[in-house]
Each structure stands twice: as C-alpha cells, then as structure tokens.
Amino acid sequence: MNWIELKALNTLYKNKEVKLNQTLTSSQEISYLINSRRKVELGHKKLSVLPGYEEMYQRDYLHNFVIYETFLESSGLISPYLRFEESDIIILMGIQRDVENGNLEPLRQQILKSEVTVRMVSLMFFRNEKYLLGKYSLINSIKLLLGIKDLADDKDQQYKFVLECKDPRCIVLCENIDFLKRPTIARANHIELWYAGGKNIAKLAFADVQGRGLPIFYSCDWDYDGLCVIYKNVMKIIPEIKLLIPNGNPRGILQTKHDSKWRGVPEDMEQLLSPLQMHMLSDLVRRDEWIIEESNDLLEMLRVSS
C-alpha cells in the first residue's frame, strides 16, 4: 500500500467514509477489504465502513499507521501529495534510526566525499539501482534524513565503500550495505568491510588485495544472484576470496516476494563451493528458500570459515 491508501483506511476508521479517487479505485488492498473481508462498501463516489471494520482496523492497521504518521510528521516529510509506498516509509525510518545512533556517519562522509550518485544510493538502501530514478520526493527525503544537500546525478560507480578499523586482520566484501551500517562489531573485532555495490564489482580489479596480505571473505545473500552470478564474477577478479557459510534462518522466496529466484544449480558451482556449501545450496534450491545476508552472525561466519 502507499500513503494515500494508508491514510484513506485511517479516514474510514475516523469518519466512517472516504471520498473515492483513482488510487483507491485501483487499490488491491481496498478491493480485498470490499470483496474478500467484506468490511468496506463501495458506493458511487465514496467508500463506507461495514460492521466489524473498526475492530479489524484497530487490530490490523492502526498501530503501524500511527508509527508511520508520527515519523513522517516529526521528520518534516508529510505533505498532501505524499505517495510513498509503505515499504519506502519503513526504509526511511531505518535510515533515520541509523543516523540517530551514528551507524550511518561513516557512510554519510563517504557519500559526501565520493559524490555518490542517485543510482548508488538507490542500490544501497533499496537494493535496486533504478528504484529511486524519477522519485524526487523520495530522493529529497533521503537527502534530508542524511543531512546531504546534493547527490551526483551520473552513472559513475568506480569507487567502493570501506568501513575501516584499527589493525585490520581480515577483509569482508559484502554484497549489501547492511553490515557497514552496523560498524561496532566489525571494528571491535578488527574486520574491514567493503561494499562495491552488488553486481557492480568490476572496480575490484583495481583493489590491492594481495599487497595488503589480509585474508578476504565474501558475504552475500544466498540466492541465485548472490551465489550464481555475483560470487562467480567476484571469484574471477579475486580468486583467493573465500565464501562465508551463512547461519541465518532460510526464508521462503515466494512468501517474501523475493526477486532473485532459483533457476536450478549451475554445473560449475561444484567447482567453486565446498561439499558443505554445495549441500546447503542444493537444500535451499529444493525448498525454494534463500538466506538474507544481514540475518547472519558475521563473527560466527568468520569463525567457521577461518
């Protein structure tokens, strides 16, 4: 749902009716409440509540709406024309939380220093480099929360993000940005974290891995893209890199509406994975599940793999 739908459901709760508009007419959530749950009645120009709507709204919607509205108002993001998706609001709240606890400050400084593009920020927070393109209200909201005046609007991604630490003892290349947003554990354990931007790894050919003399590991989503596409390409650039064995709980691909779907196991994966890793991969494919990178315990992955 987007904010217009969320606000309309709240208006129904308060006023028992709401005026129809194009967004509500085409809303799958509204259609579900009308046709399946039968808690909302569709009129010619308005929606009205049916018996049981108030109880249902209090149970299923009210708590989240209050959280979203409070966040948007306190952050100065609320406006009559707001159309953010619910998932966008959740990500923005996560950005604000990370800014307030200081976890994003190293990344913020690198964003300023490297003149990061909209595409790169989109990939960092939305895992899709094109998601933010043209979404100016969402882009401006991210800049406001990060305290950044401008983002570069080009396609240059020839830099990587590094979470540095004192006396580094290993390097972990991360598929996603999440571990770099939680710097305390990595720095306390002398782990240098790299983020190259998902699939945008060609720049790693210029990294002096051998000259550093540090072991390097790869952390990723255990899904088709993370293992069968990105990891294979990383191996071509950094043959000595070791794949970390995940310890997070698998999640159903269909249940989580995950985009990276299994297409079987490529034959050459047996040459890249250990027997244990190959067994885990085969099980995930068989059960149609995946393991999200940030659900793993980084220290435990390194302990098992070192």
Image (spheres, rainbow, N blue to C red):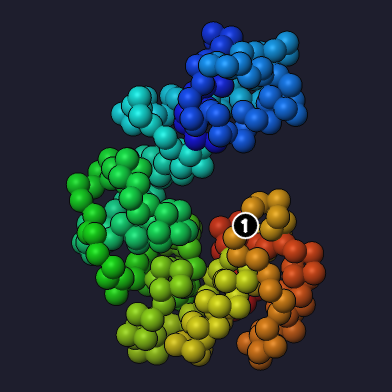
Q: Is residue 262 left or right of residue 206?
A: right
Residue in the image at 42% along x and 29% along y: 71
The type of residue carrying mark 1 is His
Q: Quadrant of the C terminus?
A: bottom right
Q: Is residue 228 above or below residue 45?
A: below
Q: Looking at the image, can residue 58 be seen?
A: no
Q: Between 81 and 291, which is closer to the camera in this rendering?
A: 81
Rendered image quadrant of residue 31: top right
Residue in the image at 62% along x and 28% along y: 30
Location of residue 297 in the rendering, given as x and y in whole percent from the top left corner? 60, 60
Q: Is residue 209 above or below residue 49?
A: below
Query: Which element type, helix, strand or loop, lies under badge 1?
Result: loop
Q: Residues within 10 Å of mark 1 (few under 14, many from 20)?
A: few
Location of residue 241 in the rendering, given as x and y in whole percent from the top left corner? 51, 84
Location of residue 275 in the rendering, given as x and y in whole percent from the top left corner? 74, 84
Residue in the image at 59% along x and 60% along y: 259
Q: Quadrant of the N terminus?
A: top right
The residue sitting at the top extreme is 15
Location of residue 187 in the rendering, given as x and y in whole percent from the top left corner? 42, 62
Q: Is residue 292 left or right of residue 270?
A: left
Write down the residue under mark 1.
258
The residue sitting at the front extreme is 44
